[in-house]
Image (spheres, grey):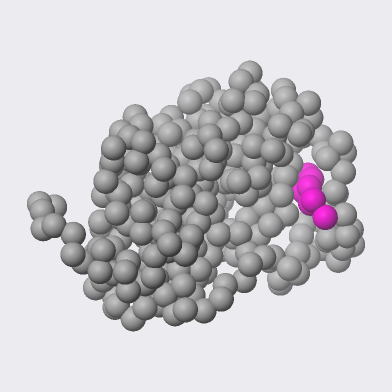
Amino acid sequence: MSIAILGAGAFGTALACTLDATQLWCRDPDQAAYMQTGRENTDRLPGVRLPASLRVTSDLAQVQADIVLLAIPMQQTRSFVETNRAHLAGRTLVACAKGVDLDLMIGPVGVIRTILPQTGVALLTGPSFAEDIARGLPTALTLACADKGLGHMLQERLSTPTLRLYRNSDVIGAELGGALKNVIAIAAGVTIGAGLGESARAALMARGYAEMQRLALSLGAQTATLAGLSGLGDLILTCGSEKSRNFRYGLALGQGLEFDRTTTVEGVATARAVARLAQARGLDMPITRMVAALTEGRLSLTEARAALLTRPLTDE
């Protein structure tokens, strides 16, 4: 079955290089033309050559494939699918975004299902950096799909010698693991940027993981999913490396520096959506609330630190 990737950011380009995709769709016609002739995505993944068999286009009507991977930012997913529902209907869709829709307060698979309820949908998520995937470094990801038959087919078709996929039918857990770890990664970056030290980062990651479980389990996710690749695995990677955009954003925030506004930081919108969702469900998520308030300018670093350190003592 043929594969196409929609979205020519770093992750979409990396997947196109690795999965033997036939087509890569790019929103910008000029960038698509350059990538087609220059065989490189110099803006997002410099130094990685595109396979000779891969065709890059900005015309969605020319994208014909059985399996379509949506490497579209979370907050753009709903409008993209709504606009292009006629083209996407009837294909097998694999969402690659990590986050929670600000309005619907659901993950990417949930968003797609609300628009295309009859379409087969899965989620590809887990601990990975685009450069590692593109260069063929060993990577393991979660393939979450409620339809076990479809999940088996996609696992076989999308796995490669260096990209190992593990099936999971707990889509909600996989969605929330990938979304919430970005929020905690911002907080981890703030911790290091503000000079609070590695011990503070470790404590924040552990308490952040508890928050991830608190919300996910309340929404019906399974504990094992949060302890797997899409939860704990992704949390460890994202909170510990400056390759992570969310961590770098938090690092700049903690240092009082400006961050590149052209870079998508999914954890910012996710923190705001999840803070509202947690409040509506009566859940205590102080780290998430802190990140949301910091990114919205409602809280200073000094106030955020004081708020977390003066919370009542309790059992772990």
- 166 over 26 or under it: above or below: above
| Residue at the spot 71% in from the left edge and 72% down from the top edge | 47
| Residue at the spot 26% in from the left edge and 49% down from the top edge | 210
Which residue range is magenta in the image? 22-28
Question: Looking at the picture, how far across and down is residue 93, in whole percent?
Answer: 64, 33
Question: Looking at the picture, how far across and down is residue 294, in whole percent?
Answer: 42, 63
Q: What is the count of numbered marks?
A: 0
- Determine whether, in the image, residue 120 is placed left or right of residue 247: right
Q: Is residue 287 visible?
A: yes
- Determine whether, in the image, residue 162 is placed left or right of residue 66: left
Magenta stretch holds residue 25 = yes
Which quadrant is home to the N terminus? top right
- 183 over 192 or under it: above or below: above
- 85 over 194 or under it: above or below: above
The residue sitting at the front extreme is 298
| Residue at the spot 11% in from the left edge and 58% down from the top edge | 313
Task: Name which quarter of the figure residue 23 lies in.
Answer: top right
Residue nearer the viewer, 280 or 27: 280
- 235 over 125 or under it: above or below: below
Question: Looking at the picture, how far across and down is residue 220, in whole percent?
Answer: 34, 29
